[in-house]
Image (tube, helix red, strand yellow):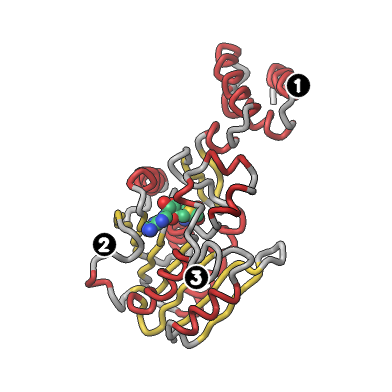
Amino acid sequence: MTDVNNDLVAELVASGLDRREARWLVEEFVPGGDLDAAGALNAAAKRRLDGEPLQYIIGHWPFRTLDLDVDPRVLIPRPETEELVGVALVELAKMGVVAPTIMDLGCGSGAIGLALLSELRERGVVATLVAVDESAEALVIARRNALKHQLHAVSFVHSSWFEEVDPSLRGRIDLIVANPPYVGREEFDHLDPVLGYEPQSAIVAPDAEGVVGFADLAVIISGAPRWLSSTGVLVCEHANTQREATTTAAAGAGFTSVEDLDDVAGHPRILVARRG
Ligand SMILES: C[S@@+](CC[C@H](N)C(=O)[O-])C[C@H]1O[C@@H](n2cnc3c(N)ncnc32)[C@H](O)[C@@H]1O
């Protein structure tokens, strides 16, 4: 960092910003110490001090090996979802399918599906992705991220879960990944207000089967077997209160092997339901 930039960081810290975030903003808005850009930097700092997430202000954020464009039309990809990608890669490796077909339900920025395609490409595996979202606006960002990373084997489907997906894909998907909305309405009102900047439709789900925020998970878990191949796997994120509901639903949907994994923080978080 130049001396000018160090001074700018110090100014932002004095105005109340966290030092690490101040550095991020300076590196983003004044990369070469160009003081003409100070206006943009100050506007960005004000947005942050007003509470807007840093990721939306910067407009992009790292997720596994990708740098993803993000804005208020999509959820900011979370670290625990990076773990889900790792779990999905292990499942694919165990399956040993040469050219897997993957479905990402509720793709948002494209985080999960695009990270999988990209990391599989690095391993010489050519996968195909069906990226589904009910939000047409989210699909705009997901498409942009696919182009940004030259991931072309993707079809984008504007659909509520499986409803509009090409029926010819039934029984042919090797892996379904999903990080659906799973927070209850009332729970949401008590969570960090910063979540209010993100699309509520990405976070909040109705209750179902007596379980808070379970309605979208219930649709995905019960619908997945019809779309998966005979050896296919569903890998799905859920709230840390939903382990019993997700594993019970998966067993009831006819999966032959059902496991639920903790995230690195030790919270029950990732359903792995195998057909084969
Ligand atoms: C928690 S966000 C996950 C986004 C992204 N997969 C990630 O992990 O960062 C949930 C996503 O599901 C989408 N969604 C909500 N309801 C849906 C539905 N009925 N059908 C398809 N997508 C839906 C939202 O628009 C949002 O993009």
Mark 3 Cα-neighbour bin, 10 Å: few <14, some 14–19, many ≥20 = many
- Residue under the point 46% across and 41% down: 69
Residue 71 rendering spot, x and y as whole percentages: 47, 38
Determine which of the numbered discs, if any, sits on residue 126 in the image: none
Q: Distance between the residues labelled 1 and 3?
A: 44 Å
Q: Which amino acid lies under the numbered mark 3 shown in the image of this protein?
A: Val
Residue 222 rendering spot, x and y as whole percentages: 41, 76
- Residue under the point 48% across and 79% down: 250
Determine which of the numbered discs, if any, sits on residue 164 in the image: 2
Determine which of the numbered discs, if any, sits on residue 235 in the image: 3
> Is residue 73 rendered to the left or right of residue 22?
left
> Is residue 1 rendered to the left or right of residue 76?
right
Residue 240 rendering spot, x and y as whole percentages: 63, 65
Establish whether ligand 1 lies closer than 8 Å to the Cβ of label 3: no
Position of the N terminus by quadrant:
top right
Question: Which residue is disc 1 drawn over?
Answer: 10
Between disc 3 and disc 2, the foreground one is 2
Mark 1 Cα-neighbour bin, 10 Å: few <14, some 14–19, many ≥20 = some
Query: Which of the two labelled residues, at mark 1 and mark 2, occupies the earlier sequence position?
Result: 1
Instruction: Point out the residue furthest to the top here.
Output: 36
Q: Which of 108 and 27 is in front in this view?
A: 108
- Residue under the point 63% across and 67% down: 241
Query: Which of the two labelled residues, at mark 3 and mark 2, occupies the earlier sequence position?
Result: 2
In which image quadrant can residue 193 be found?
Answer: top right
Tally of numbered tags: 3
Q: Mark 3 near mark 2, Cβ–Cβ under 8 Å?
A: no
Q: Which amino acid lies under the numbered mark 2 shown in the image of this protein?
A: Glu
Vertical side of 203 occupied by 170: above or below = below
Between disc 1 and disc 3, the foreground one is 3
